Image (spheres, coloured by chain):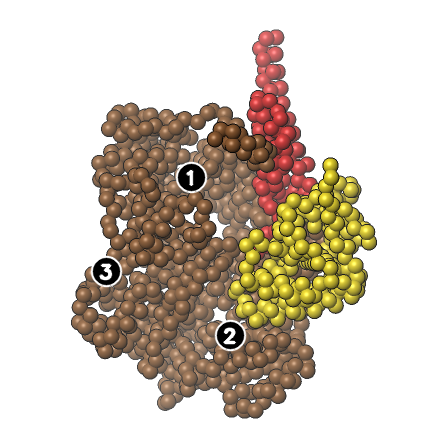
Chain colours: A red, B brown, C yellow
Amino acid sequence: MGRTLPSATQLMLQEEASLARFRRALRRSDQLAFDDLFTAAQKHISAAAYAAHALPFETFLMSMLLEEHKEVMRLRKIVETLEEMHA
Amino acid sequence: MREFTGWLLDLFEDPREGLVLYFIEEQGGRQRLTRPFPVTFYALGKDAQLRALWQHLSDRPGEITLRRARRMDVFKRGRVTALAVTIHNPYEARKTFYRIANQFPSLEYADADLQISLRFAAETGAFPLSYCRVLADESDQLRDIEVLEDAWTLKPSPIPLRTMSLAPDVAPHHEPPHYLKVEVEGEEYHLDFSTWRPLLVNLRALIQRHDPDLLLTDWGDTWLLPLLLQQSEKHHIPLRLNREAGRGVSWHEERTYFSYGQIVYRGQQVHLFGRCHIDRQNAMLWKDYELDGTIEVSRVTALPLQTSSRVSPGTGISSIEMLTALREGILVPWQKQQAEMLKPAADLFTADQGGLVYQPRIGVHKDVAEIDFVSLYPAIMVHFNISPETILPDPDAENRVPALGLAIDTSQDGLIPKALRPLLEKRIEMKKHLATTPTWDPYRKNFKHRASALKWLLVTCFGYLGYKNARFGRIEAHQAVTAYGREALLRAKEAAEDMGYRVIQLYVDGLWVQHPDKTHPNDIEPLLLEIQERTGLPISLDGIYRWVVFVGSRQNKKRPVANRYFGVFQDGSIKVRGIDARRRDSTPFVANAQRHLLELLAGQAEPEDALPEAVAYLRQRLMALHRGQVKLPELLVRQRLGRKLESYRAPSPAARAVMQLKDAGKEMRPGQRVPFLYTLGKPGVFAWDRPQAPNPRTVDVARYQRLLLRAAAIVLESWGLDEEKLTERVLSEASQLRLPSPSRQHPRQHRRNIPGVVDTAMDRALKRQSQ
Amino acid sequence: MDRQITTFPIPTTGKISLVVAPRTVVPSLMSMLAALALRGRVIVVDGGNCFDGYALARALRRHTHQVQAALKAVQLSRAFTCYQMVAMLAELPVDGTPVIVLDMLSTFLDENVGPAKRQRLLDNSLALLRRISQGAPVAVWSRSHSTPNDDGQVLLTPLLEAAHDIWELETPELPEHQLPLF
């Protein structure tokens, strides 16, 4: 008894489904990049669940952005290292 | 007057003598005593209706006494006026109550239809299997009873229980048994089923000679006892299964019901009088805690042994709550249930959550400490005083439940904390005791079983708090507990991170943490203390893993899930969750192999060093499979039928197996596990309980090979042997194992045919065109 | 494009409005609920565990940024048994706040409770709803099933009798909902 609202995982699937038409019209290579965004958002689904926003897509977007930023920081470090090597 | 010490074995209502009680005397005998035992229930409602009830009942002075009373209503948070109806003959109490409830349906009732053992325990303190001092008079009436060891005693005196076990030599639903195996007092007898007269005569003699207190059977409820009684009548050889004379056995019908969306099947039951019957095959958690644990449940819940062995832990918890209420003079509602308080929809988003669960990083992690709160939810209920009656709607309160618009009234102990506290404390004490008891101590098994029984009760009490049919359930209490749970876990995470740990995984009541300099149990102590400080809740170290692997989901290996992992602790012990080795539906051939692989990995300081042996082992198992050397029971899959047979569009393997059984005249109910083999061709399965024996050459060897390699890959791929590589290596030097290789998948599978997006009208048009 | 527009019955004080429709009507009900929540308090009694908070939030977002405030205006209680349903209705404040009941009959189909008892509890519930409707607008949604069962039909009858305005919808696709005119 008691659970009325869908889980964060289900919500994410619903958001993905609501973007299905958008995805379909993308080039195949773009579709794969699109899928990567949702895979990234999956990593923080527990935080999205805890946040319990009434409009959860905002938290999913934050998760995607978070992972993008982590990737940027990772690449930045590599670039810095490479620059030093060539200096 | 005479006095003796002993254990209360059984108690039940009698039409003439009130309550009948059977005792096991410490000095060796068995005592039957009686005691008048009037039973009281309460009627509540409008004054006019109560008066009508009073008038209706007041012309039966010898049988019923009426009295105006004020009793505590836990939901109204105060005393209410009620009509106390006392029925003198306890045997008539249930029937009389239902008659009254039917005639006056608009009234509410309390303390009605309760187990007599609960009432007796509430009144005298004596629970089933309690060690007591008993005073009886010359007419064998119970005059006084004093409990000498309460239900929370850590080492209760062992009961000199006389047990007789009755078991058919094979499982009756699989093939007709040949003989009945009787074991009693160290002796074993085989009674042939093909000759009923000698069987019955001998069995009767054995029961008479040994006078067992407990009949322990296999399939006694659903097959053996009904059959014995049927044959006994047919051959006119009375079998005194009861100790109590003048009564037949007590039959409880079979039931199928829905619980939490699952179909639950409860087989028919046979209860005895004066003697206990436990059917090991029908006992809820027998494998987990056997007789020791079952006795513990009886003691702690005040349910008689024959009931406690057959009911779910939920019923046990309900019993504990009702017992506490009876003792405290709190009304136990018969049917009324509390509705949820009106709350802003905005609150539902934060309230309607479970425990916090992270997505772990898939792969190997080294030197990881697993720390768990001790019985988190029960501890929260006790520590924060959460009970149906202590919840107040108060969004502005200072001591609000975290993130919810609720506050807890801490001025008085709630009913649930009162009921749970002794249970929780005992479990903690037993755990501590177990930790210091050496493995060779004969008491150890007893302790383990009893601790397990308590654990099951505790694990259920949270779910029960939110259960819609629970007498003392309240959804706000349930929500408050999960809210405190999330808060506690987050504070634990913060404490760990403040102290330099990395958090590998969070899971409802536990966390996995890693620190390069803290790899010894003593190093973790400061963290445990800090967490206890910040949360007020006890937490302990489960162990430090040498390494632990988090596995992806069954459907998608790349998707992390929280409940599939395996690892080796520093002491060499292995912990597995969620993969074949632990799953009840996996076939032993695969489960055992996976377990063995884990042991190989655990046996080496560097798991990689175990790989050659692992590959050799798999090769050997597959050779045995191909040569037909694997015994068929090891290849059995045991799946549950999730729904009714008719509702399957494409029958699952389990459904196909059930259909085979149906054709052979054997009924299986939803909820039961169906054992079957995978076979070649259609229908691809062979139900194990079919009357004919399966042909070993029809076993789908290729399928079992795939299952084995897939399961092995789960364990080995962290060290480089994924399913593809593993299959290659295992098959490479054994050409006789070569089978069509598993189909390759495109490296990046993109999705087609997203429902709702692809135009089905166009699909149909295309289909028409091509026809 | 010519589309049929179905307007939900306008709940008015003094009458019970009833919608009989399959589960797919829930998003439209949430739209109606959003419209009501933007105007003031509204009470929702959920008898089938089908309250779709996220659909409500999305519907609100289409009209306002103050989604949280509007969500606070919706007072929700969920009934999981027929006993809870009756208890809930008996405790509702009768102060003019509109009352919406979702999936009214679901809890009365629980076979663990005897049919006579369920019938009696339903009668109690309807009597309570009648009383509430005298002081506030009341709208009830009863779920229709694709495979109708006898129990459901038996219980639907008193509900049909208690209602003043009845809408039966069969189409799974419900077009855009118009705002009710209160």
Amino acid at circle 3: Pro
Q: Classify residue B294 by image quadrant.
A: bottom left
Q: Can you tell which mark lies on residue B113?
A: 2
Query: Residue beneath label 1, please?
Result: B566
Q: Can you tell which mark lies on residue B64?
A: none
Q: Earlier in the sequence, mark 1 or mark 2?
A: 2
Q: Is residue B67 above or below residue C54?
A: below
Amino acid at circle 1: Phe
Q: Earlier in the sequence, mark 2 or mark 3?
A: 2
Q: At 57% across and 28% down in the image, what residue appears?
A: A36
Label 2 chain ID: B
Q: Is residue B240 above or below residue C131?
A: below
Query: Residue beneath label 3, please?
Result: B177
Callout in the foreground (2, 3) = 3
Amino acid at circle 2: Asp
Label 1 chain ID: B
Q: Are marks 3 and 1 on the same chain?
A: yes
Are circles 2 and 3 on residues that touch, CB within 8 Å? no
Are circles 3 and 1 on residues that touch, CB within 8 Å? no
Q: At 36% across and 89% down in the image, what residue appears?
A: B138
Residue C63: image location, x then y, percent: 78, 42
Q: Is residue B472 above or below residue C147?
A: below
Q: Identify the secondary structure beneath mark 3.
A: loop
Q: Classify residue B55 by image quadrant.
A: bottom right
Residue B4: image location, x then y, percent: 36, 80
